[in-house]
Amino acid sequence: MRPSGRTPDALRAVSIEPGFAHHAEGSVLIRMGGTEVLCAASIESRVPGFLRNSGQGWVTAEYGMLPRATHTRGDREAARGKQSGRTQEIQRLIGRSLRAVIDRAALGEMTITLDCDVLNADGGTRCAAITGAWVALSLACRHLVAMNVLKASPITGQVAAVSCGLVGGAAVLDLDYAEDSGADADSNFILTDAGGIVEIQATAEKAPFSEARFQELLALARLGTGRLFAIQRAALEPA
């Protein structure tokens, strides 16, 4: 039995609330169990220097955690004067994941930045950020269409992320902190609704695990992201 009482293939309770940040062109508050992440999309009519006059746009992300998102207070990275390696790695991952499902030529020379701020952390913050950021990005693109800046949304598909792991010898979906902190192996799967793999991060925390066990985790991830894709679509439906 998992600490949460869930079956091995069960997600935590998931909700996506659009429009949480009132001034952003697209925003959501995503909740996955005790993890809550605010994802806000901002549009700028310029691109980084390496893309000027290329006709292509850019999608990027920034990620951060509030000091009391965790059990003990963490220092603000701004106060330290630099971002941690973990923060940089996660925000690059979010950006790569979103760029996998947008036609940057159709976007044109604009930049959309996704700010992903963790309000409460209970495992899987990067997965929640990616899943919520896709909805915020989609809302921002709808805004561009509504303002007649674009004729159609440049979004080409959905992307979502979920964690899987080996806990107590069992393959389980969507680890919370209690499971993640003691897992034999943990992984993050970033997948598209077309079945594509954007990125897989898998680590044996104790003994190496077999390819057969990895396939178990991948099957769980496909099941979990399939459910997340449905929740994303529902969040974009008119109220």
Image: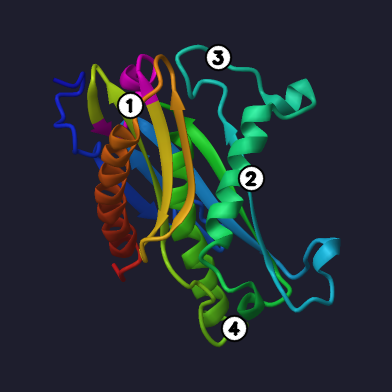
Camera-side mark, 3 or 1? 1
Residue that label 3 marks: 73
Magenta region includes residue 176:
yes
**Marks 4 and 2, Cα distance to the nearest angstrom?**
26 Å
Q: Residues within 10 Å of mark 4 (few under 14, many from 20)?
A: some
Residue that label 4 marks: 150
Q: Quadrant of the N terminus?
A: top left
**Marks 4 and 1, Cα distance to the nearest angstrom?**
40 Å
Residue that label 2 marks: 92
Please provide percent x and percent y for residue 151: 55, 88
Sequence order check, earlier mark of 3 and 2? 3
Please provide percent x and percent y for residue 221: 31, 45
Please provide percent x and percent y for residue 12: 25, 36
Please provide percent x and percent y for residue 54: 79, 76
Q: Which residues are magenta?
A: 172-185
Q: Quadrant of residue 56?
A: bottom right
Q: How is the image coloured?
A: rainbow
Asked if residue 7 is positioned above or below residue 42 in the image, the reply reads above
